[in-house]
Amino acid sequence: MTHPVVHKLHGIERIDDHAWMRDSAAVRDVLVSERRRYESRIAHTAPFRQHLAAIMAGRTPETESSVSWRHGAFVYYTQIDAGREFGEFRRKRDATDHVLLDLDAFGDYVELGVREVSPDGRWLAYSIDVTGDEVYDLRFRDLSTMTDLPVSIGGTYYTGGWSEGWFYYTVVDEVYRPCEVRRYDIATGADEVVLREGDRRFELTVRATRSGTHLLITAASRDTTEVWSVVDGVPESVGGRRPGVEYRCDATLDGLVTWTDDGHAEFRVVGVPPLPGERIHSVDCFDGYKVLTLRRGGDPLLRVLGDDGTSYEVHPPVACGRIALVHNEEYLTDSVIFETGSYSEPTQWWRLTLASGVRRLLKENPRYDGYVSERLWAPAPDGARIPVTVVRRADVPLDGTAPCLLYGYGAYEAVFDPTWDAALSAFLDQGAVFAHAHVRGGGEMGRAWWQAGRLSRKTTTFTDHIAAAEFLLDGHVSKIATRGLSAGGLLQAAVYGMRPDLWAAVVAEVPFVDVVTTMLDDTIPLTVNEWDEWGDPRRLEDFTWMLAYSPYDNIPSGDLPPLLVTGAVNDPRVLVHEPAKWVAALRAKGADPLFRVEVEDGGHSGPPGRYAHLHYEAEIFSFVLEELKKT
């Protein structure tokens, strides 16, 4: 069924045979049929999928508890008991232990948005999404009686904070943009607007600082921010808004601490001399100390700055690892918690004494030995060196004999630092290699790395990924499948058409593929506020570079590798018609991709529950391994 639509812009006509999928109610029947077709086509892999899922589940502790953290008079932690998908939020004091929030009680699908306990420990503000559309219902629980107030505020987003008895939160507009900050008074039920952002390029977030002195609202586009400090419900701008300038803030008892790219592209802390080659991502303030989270040479680290002028660094304990502050709610503290890990090492939680720099291990997830991670560098066509993190079993050589799954993303200056994953370990046990190409457009090598892979330079993301694959195939691995999600799905769709000869298989999860048409439609989420990432095709220059790589406008033909595409009807980030249209267009050219679509509850990243997600990963890996094992 086709109902061609002709798009005319800049003197160019684009014929869209599948435009009807954008609005037609009939598309649901198509998607249901597609899901049935998919289930039929993968039926033969059921025993192998079950085998993989069993291995994954066997490496997932039946009961998982987080490290605990203090907030006020209580100690908090999360726990997932045996057989449960989502788990509980708990707290304890002395010998008493209470469940504050049981996520499994909300059904088979739930995503948690806000989870903020009031400073006095009396109230819990929490929000949930039970469909996958990333729009949350906000509720308030009296922790003294464990009952919810008879109010549920719909249309909220996932930031919020308490201040002087009010709870501040964000709400979304018709295109899911968090555009308004409101506050709710627990005592009276009053609900009032604090700030509304009229510029559709900007999204709002709100949070309370751990010092308790400031409630901060941040408006952010792709390259500009403005921060307000709220006093008695009235926002006062901290540094105004200047196009192309970003700044963010945290607070001590004495005032605000700001870090900005004004005068230093990779950010600087105001009043602290910047160091070359470093990208500062955040500053967390504690009594007498500031902890900087930054990157240098592709690796993350922490720098602790004492008010007395002392300074030292904290690095991951393993190569190709990650490090991040977590669960630090208290300002008046002499220590902080951070976590580390890698693709081959389990997550560990440490307590760092701020004055001495001494770290103490608090908790470690189960360890599975025999896996190794290393960093390789692939040469790009323009001479840049692309970092590639490679993980494998120690007994699987990098001599060109083992197959490989290559992962890539490359957008928004996003960084995906490695973490141990039971699903990945089951894949590695099949004698395969996993490689993560940190291509330009991402942020692993700093702000300049992002700038080199956005707007008119977007194709650099794709050629970097291809260069990484060619490098790996030159004596390191035997064949390659490639995988990515969302903007990473765009990457997979692009390289699928640019170099189909490189891939044993391609997995494009919720791929952003109809680039020009989507970025012309300002009635759908993520269009206006992403013109600064992809371009505005109303401008001829932008239209030209976007049209040149848009996968839906450049459907390949000929000998193409096996392809698995995913989508979800409730996905607000990549609307399901995009992958559906791309699949239909590919079939019209003779390809026959698998299309796994979530037609009921389900969101952008697949099933959220821990076992449901393992079964999803087993599906993806069984497809990949089946193709990699073919001769």
Image: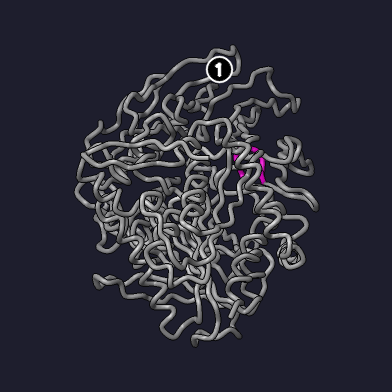
Residue shown at 61% from the left, 51% from the top: 596
Residue matched to label 1: 185
In the picture shown, does residue 503 fall above or below 12?
A: below
Name the main secondary structure of what is drawn in magenta. strand
Query: How far from the left and from the top, in percent, is residue 295?
Result: 37, 61
Is 46 magenta? The answer is no
Quarter where residue 518 is shown = top left
Q: In front: 193, or 510?
A: 510
Q: Is residue 123 left or right of residue 407?
A: right
Q: Residue 336 location, x and y as percent?
A: 52, 53
User: Is 215 situated left or right of 49 in this image?
Assistant: left
Vertical side of 435 occupied by 64: above or below: above
- At horizontal 39% and vertical 53% (from top left) the residue drawn is 551
Q: x, y (%) of residue 16? A: 40, 41
| Above-or-below relation of 142 to 318 | above
Q: Is 304 left or right of 48, judged from the image as shown? A: left
Magenta residues span 70-77
Callout 1 secondary element: strand
**Front-most of 137 and 358?**
137
By what rule are the colours in the image chosen? one colour
* Residue type, label 1: Asp
Residue 304 appears anywhere in the view: no
* Quadrant that contains the C terminus: bottom right
